[in-house]
């Protein structure tokens, strides 16, 4: 795929992210047709094409075995003709900056380390699907999460360059791969890196919780489960940001039912942390007060709402019956424990079964102040 073709593909994706939803949201208080599944829409196909293009270009330099791709809990940015990359593991608290370039590898690493350390807190300024340089704008995302050799936070370019020099002089490693020799450094985040990221968004979470009457610990738990507080998170399903919002489903519902405006959010809108948390919390509100309002027991509704955030309201109801009205009746006949057991063992999607368990586990930890 040529660079021109990539630009055209990106344009298609952006235009798709500004169109109106194809079908209205369901109202589970009225009879609905049997639950069916649909094939991926054009947005997902466009995202898949961008991932495929990125993989093709990066594998030319790194080879099949060494290719690493961005995900929900992992940020990977390729630079310098795809020969240099930054790989951030948010769960492990590790940053790896590597290059396969045999021409001035230390200089390539130096530049990539600085860009990584100073990458902006607002993810909309970065393009994961190209090898363009990271735009260094505003407050660095890693401020407080990484310290230099003197234990100082890294906010300015001179300090980032100084730390990069130290890493290359003292921590540089290399390994042989099929495509040649890879040079790399590993940077450890501070021990409380998760709490540091959590703190960045505390005021946004607090405001969204009040705005939509959703518990703060639930919002935190969803963010931890979805992205480990990675604002750059993107998935093959076309979900973006901290709470992994899909524009044409949750995004469309929030715009139409809460914001009272047409269309759906763009990926740039959802890469903004404040917009993303607001949208995710608003969607939880919709699930609680609209799609699942007929669930009579508050605990059962809470379990259903969490499960629906991942697998959709249809997935929750399909756990109990193929007919939506019958499904709601069956759900309400069960105790909260029976609802939980059903959603974690009988939900049509295995991911959704595990999702409810993870969110509740993290919510308990956030409530008790363990995270």
Image (cartoon, rainbow, N blue to C red):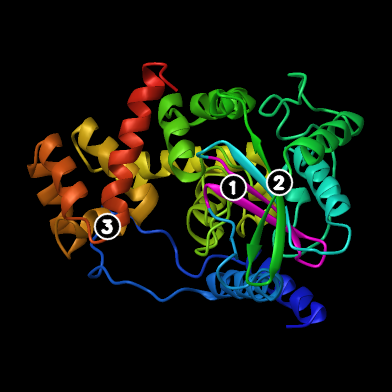
Instruction: Reply yes or no: does residue 108 show up in magenta.
Output: no
Callouts 1 and 2 close, C-beta under 8 Å: yes
Which residue does the image show at 68% across and 49% down from the upper left? Answer: 269
Mark 3 or 1: in front is 3
In the visual, does 233 lie left or right of 250?
Answer: right
Q: Earlier in the sequence, mark 2 or mark 3?
A: 2
Residue sticking out furthest to the right: 158
Magenta stretch? Answer: 72-90
In this orientation, which residue lies closer to the viewer: 143 or 205? 143
What secondary structure is found at the residue carrying circle 2?
Answer: helix
In this orientation, which residue lies closer to the viewer: 240 or 113? 113
What is the x, y in percent for residue 343?
20, 48
What is the x, y in percent for residue 55?
63, 71
In which quadrant will I find the N terminus? bottom right
What secondary structure is found at the residue carrying circle 3?
Answer: helix
- In this rendering, the answer to whether 119 lies above or below 46 is above
What is the x, y in percent for residue 9?
71, 76
Q: Is residue 135 visible?
A: no
Judging by the rendered image, the residue that carries numbered circle 1 is 241
- In this rendering, the answer to whether 287 lies above or below 35 is above
Instruction: Reply yes or no: does residue 89 show up in magenta.
Output: yes
Judging by the rendered image, the residue that carries numbered circle 2 is 123
């Amino acid at each position: 795929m040529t660079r021109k073709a990539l630009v055209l593909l990106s344009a298609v994706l952006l235009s798709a992210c500004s169109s109106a939803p194809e079908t209205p949201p369901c109202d589970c208080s009225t009879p609905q047709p049997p639950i069916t599944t649909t094939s991926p829409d054009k947005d997902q196909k466009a995202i898949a094409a961008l991932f495929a293009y990125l993989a093709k270009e990066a594998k030319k330099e790194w080879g099949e075995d060494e290719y690493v791709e961005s995900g929900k809990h992992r940020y990977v940015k390729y630079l310098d003709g795809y020969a240099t990359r930054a790989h951030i593991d948010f769960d492990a608290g590790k940053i790896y900056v590597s290059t396969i370039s045999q021409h001035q590898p230390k200089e390539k690493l130096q530049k990539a380390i600085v860009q990584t350390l100073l990458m902006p807190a607002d993810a909309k300024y970065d393009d994961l699907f190209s090898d363009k340089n990271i735009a260094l704008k505003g407050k660095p995302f890693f401020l407080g999460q990484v310290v230099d050799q003197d234990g100082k936070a890294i906010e300015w370019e001179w300090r980032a360059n100084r730390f990069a020099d130290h890493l290359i002089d003292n921590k540089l490693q290399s390994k042989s791969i099929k495509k040649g020799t890879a040079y790399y450094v590993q940077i450890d985040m501070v021990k409380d890196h998760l709490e540091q990221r959590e703190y960045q968004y505390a005021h946004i979470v607090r405001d969204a919780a009040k705005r939509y009457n959703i518990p703060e610990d639930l919002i935190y738990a969803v963010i931890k489960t979805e992205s480990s507080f990675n604002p750059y998170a993107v998935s093959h399903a076309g979900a973006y940001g901290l709470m992994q919002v899909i524009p044409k489903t949750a995004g469309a519902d929030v715009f139409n039912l809460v914001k009272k405006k047409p269309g759906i959010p763009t990926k740039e809108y959802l890469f903004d942390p404040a917009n993303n948390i607001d949208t995710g919390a608003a969607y939880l509100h919709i699930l609680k007060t609209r799609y699942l309002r007929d669930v009579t027991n508050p605990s059962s509704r809470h379990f259903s709402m969490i499960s629906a955030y991942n697998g959709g309201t249809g997935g929750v109801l399909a756990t109990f019956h193929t007919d939506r009205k019958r499904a709601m009746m069956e759900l309400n006949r069960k105790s909260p424990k029976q609802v939980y057991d059903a959603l974690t063992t009988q939900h049509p999607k295995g991911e959704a079964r595990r999702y409810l368990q993870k969110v509740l586990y993290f919510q308990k930890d956030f409530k008790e102040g363990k995270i």
